[in-house]
Amino acid sequence: MLETEGKSLDPADWTAFRAQAHKMLDDMLDYTQGLNARAVWQPMPAEVQTHLRGSLTEKTLGDAHVDFMQNILPYAVGNTHPRFMGWVHGGGTPVGMVAEMLAAGLNANLGGRNQAPVEIERQVMRWVRDLFGFPETASGLFVTGTSMANLIGCLCAKSQANDAENLTAYTSTAAHISVAQSLDICGIGKNALQKIPVNENYEMDVLALEQAIISDKKAGKTPFLVVATIGTVDVGAIDDLQKVAAICEREKVWFHIDGAFGALAMLSPELAPRLKGIELADSIAFDFHKWGQVPYDAGFILVRDSEIHQKTFASPAAYLQRQERGLSANSPWACDLGLDLSRSFRALKTWFTLSVYGNEKLGQVIAHTCELAQLLKRNIENSPELELLAPVALNIVCFRYRCDDANRVNTEIVIALQESGIAAPSSTTLNGNVAIRAAIVNHRTTENDIAILLEAVLKFGNVLTTSTP
């Protein structure tokens, strides 16, 4: 007889485990409730780095929790904090956190099969399908993030092109690097990507796009994909979706939208009109974990034509046979629509977030971050020490401290802000000028946080430009 005693990984003492689990949950709720009193970010001391690079040692759950609280939690990137403005990272919510716990407890694999978690993912797909004005023929899939979603959009476009030769794709010079990476992974190569110049508002020049497509066709190339952006990485610009869509329709080119954070502006009645034309796309990539405030990760790809989507990825295999009944029913499966067979239940934390907060509340949060960006813009324009470096289309503000040797000084200001723990913007370069880049994404950010950021920029700028006797 097999010896099975003691082989399970379940707790021997469920009462003690339950007490420890409640303490771990309480510690994370305390952490979230007390974010304002913490530093946004702090560098890891050398001894912590050494500890985290050590060999594996077994420990009790309680000891592992202590290790987490002492050596991991204090040194995270800080995007839950209201003054984290470095990159477009959502702040997460307590609702999303406990929903993630439920999903982990269920431990569902959403590669497919006949199960309720798959229906939850499909329900969220229908919600966003309706939000973006897509037809009932649309299909969608949760992925890690927009980089993966852009890849799926590119693969669908390639499939629709029916393996034509000399494929050529187009996006703006302000687009995310994942567009070029997708072409490489697709086997087309990033050299097939035409980067179209942008106008003074950092939007794709649609006349230049049209001319590039016409020129490439005359040269014997096959234009197959245009990627427009809602919320460019540097400044948050929105390409003219209607004009891009019209060109794609006329030239029979797949129209993909990288809406990593900007697509969810559709939740705001004030912002949605600026995204007119999104309903004309062939595919849309976006993230719930940015403006949607869902905990990482929760990216999504929506494809207008489910037949093209399924044709691109479906690969029958004996061990994945489908039936009309039983666990093997409920086709098509998620593995027919993407690259992964093993998939986590990302849909649950998104479903909870949308269900508990609702579209209206989330739309108000999104609109408020844009209002805060406009407040920051006005304060910069009213400060003689500061200079705005780009238009503020949505929630990203790029500016600098005016001084000699401005590129060096502004780079140092950003680092000083981060290391102080006061605020955490990032830096970028626009027309050769180093900019302090504040991306306001977190639902916790207030007008007071904007004032604290500006006060600190001016303080560090003055320190860095004042000669020491």
Image: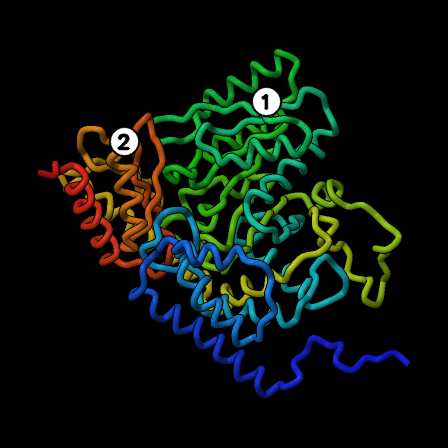
Provide the secondary structure element on which disc 2 rests.
helix
| Residue 168, image x, y percentages | 61, 23
Q: Looking at numbered disc 1 in the image, what kind of residue is underneath it?
A: Asn
Q: Residues within 10 Å of mark 1 (few under 14, many from 20)?
A: few
Marked residue nearer the N-terminal end (1 or 2)? 1
* Residue type at numbered disc 2: Asn
Which residue lies at the image location 50% right of the left edge and 80% below the top edge? 22
The spot of residue 372 in percent (x, y) is 28, 52
Q: Quadrant of residue 102?
A: bottom right
Give above or below for 284 relative to 27: above
Seen in the picture, residue 119 relative to 188 is either above or below; the reply is: below
Residue drawn at point x = 56 percent, y = 42 percent: 147
Closer-to-camera residue (279/41): 41
Residue 407 has which mark?
2
User: Would residue 370 be visible to someone looking at this image?
Assistant: no
Q: Is residue 156 left or right of residue 128?
A: right
Number of on-image labels? 2
Whether residue 206 is situated above or below residue 287 in the rendered picture? above
159 or 138, which is in the foreground?
159
Quadrant in which the N terminus is drawn: bottom right
Which residue in the rendered view is the most extreme toward the bottom? 15
Query: Residue at left 58%, top 40%?
Result: 150
Query: Closest to the observer: 413 or 46?
Result: 46
Disc 1 target residue: 191
Residue visible at 82% across and 62% down in the picture: 328
Label annotation for residue 214: none
**Callout 1 touching callout 2 (CB < 8 Å):** no
* Mark nearer the viewer, 1 or 2: 2
Percent coordinates x, y for residue 426 in the rendering: 35, 43
x and y percent of residue 25 in the render?
A: 48, 75
